[in-house]
Amino acid sequence: MIDPMTWKFKRKPTLFKSTTVKLRLYRKHRQAQGFKAVKMNATEDLGWLDSPSALQGCVDRLKVVKSLGMDAGVDFHGRVHRPMAKQLAHLLEPLQPMFIEEPLLSEHIEGIKLLSQQTSIPIALGERLHSRWDVKPFLEAGAVDILQPDICHVGGISEIRRIANMCETYDVALAPHCPLGPIALAACVQVDACTANFAIQEMSLGIHYNAGTEDLTSYTKNPEVWNVKDGYINVMTGPGLGIEVDEEWVRRASKEATPWVSPGFVGPGGEVREW
């Protein structure tokens, strides 16, 4: 299992010591939970061509995580443009991250293919692809090493299984995107358990999106199914997806529920930037 909790940070070098301390505490907490790998955001928003110094924070944080004995995937989040993405990939390469995720937006398949030829780091993407037809050109181009379809975006178990089978024929691993709730994760786990090229599963336990609200274990009656040991969970044995939803809890919570609004970045000129 991979824990997708990310660290927000500032570019000021003076904060690096504080960030290092937080990362060390974070690592101990995650290792106590059984995790062996984490996923972290690469940067905050960047300009099309930004100062190279804006990339150093990512390098420093990855060094800390690796020095503490954990693997890490680095999520560029599609917010890094090509002039900066190839610089950052080059800087990260000696540190051997598990993968870099969405090094460019998925619309830029030519750029992603070129970047994949310039780095030895595995390229991961897929959350913005919505069917096997969206996935097909990336496989044909040899532009991706780890496919991360989102089971909610592609329409469910049947389609993600078809995508997994397509990936296997191109020697591409499957790592379903899932910073979501227990129902989506349980569905992913069912797919993972019967997929030959399954690699690693993202889960949202303690993710920063959930701070101050509900978490992965909030509205199920058997949250112990998400207990991680030595980087693994047990395959669920219960009926259906293997989780038991507390329907009364959901009804109570829905009365005060408000839609989640995706955050965003605005550049110094007032331009909207990719979040």
Image: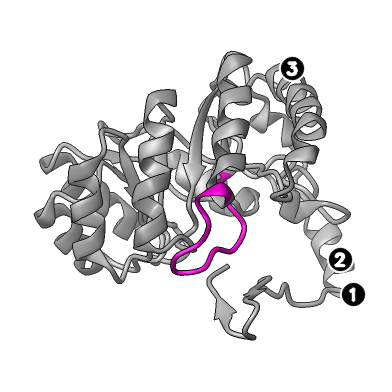
Which region of the structure is painted magenta?
Answer: 41-53
Q: Quadrant of residue 20?
A: top right
Of marks 3 and 2, the one in the foreground: 3
Q: Can you tell which mark lies on residue 26?
A: none
* Amino acid on which the number 3 mark rests in the picture: Ala
Horizontal side, residue 152 vs residue 172: left or right: right
* Amino acid on which the number 1 mark rests in the picture: Glu
Residue 255: % across, % down: 88, 75
Disc 1/disc 3 C-alpha distance (Å): 34 Å
Q: Is label 1 in contact with label 2 (beta carbons under 8 Å)?
A: yes
Vertical side of 141 occupied by 265: above or below: below
Q: Residue at x 53, y 71 (%)?
A: 274
Residue 235: % across, % down: 51, 28
Q: Residue at x 68, y 18 (%)?
A: 31
Q: Is residue 40 visible?
A: yes
Please tell me which residue lies in front, 264 or 214.
264
> Which residue is labeled 3 in the image?
32
Local SS, label 3? helix
> Which residue is labeled 1 in the image?
256
Tell me if mark 1 has few (under 14), some (14-19) or many (20+) residues whose alpha carbon lies within 10 angstroms of its own.
Answer: few
Q: Is label 1 in contact with label 3 (beta carbons under 8 Å)?
A: no
Of callouts 1 and 3, the N-terminal one: 3
Residue 6: % across, % down: 66, 44
> Which residue is labeled 2 in the image?
253
Tell me if mark 3 has few (under 14), some (14-19) or many (20+) residues whose alpha carbon lies within 10 angstroms of its own.
Answer: few
Of marks 1 and 3, the one in the foreground: 3
Residue 167: % across, % down: 20, 46
Q: Is residue 51 magenta?
A: yes
Q: Quadrant of residue 121?
A: top left
